[in-house]
Image (cartoon, rainbow, N blue to C red):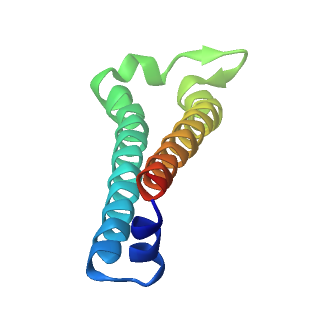
Amino acid sequence: MVRTRVEVQEQTEVGDAMIRGLVRAQLSLALRVALVVGLLFGAIPLLLVAFPAVAGVAVLGVRLPWLLAICLPVPILLAAGRFYIRAAERNEQDFADLVDD
């Protein structure tokens, strides 16, 4: 247990490799979440291009594209942020468990 912690604290090759693994895992997670959010946001204009009749629909006097642009991003970003924080904390906890073992 102490040896692994010393490897990380003294930034030896083993400790450096462990930290790079954590950074790589966090970067991978961030890129995957950003890709999913980007695809979801990109789907909105594609939907409107694929189905032009949808663009003309009005709900309570407001056209559907405006409603989608105003109401849809907030829940998507909140869900993505919540997922990212939980997954990032899980990565950090796994790293801490690795160091403590």
Q: State the residue in front, 13 or 30.
A: 13
Total labels drawn: 0
**Is 65 above or below relative to 32?**
above
**Is 51 above or below relative to 2?**
above
Displayed quadrant of residue 28? bottom left
96 relative position to 78: left or right:
left
Q: State the residue in front, 26 or 79.
A: 26
Residue 12: percent from left, percent from top:
33, 83
Residue 73: percent from left, percent from top:
57, 37
**Is 27 above or below relative to 101?**
below
43 relative position to 66: left or right:
left
Residue positioned 49% across, 55% down in the render: 100
Displayed quadrant of residue 42? top left
55 relative position to 67: left or right:
left
Q: Residue furthest front?
A: 2
Q: Residue furthest right?
A: 60
96 relative position to 58: left or right:
left
Residue 47: percent from left, percent from top:
35, 26
Q: State the residue in front, 48 or 30.
A: 30
Q: State the residue in front, 91 or 98.
A: 98
Give the quadrant of the N terminus: bottom left
**Is 12 above or below relative to 44?**
below
Residue positioned 28% across, 25% down in the render: 50
Residue positioned 35% across, 54% down in the render: 31
Residue positioned 50% across, 49% down in the render: 88
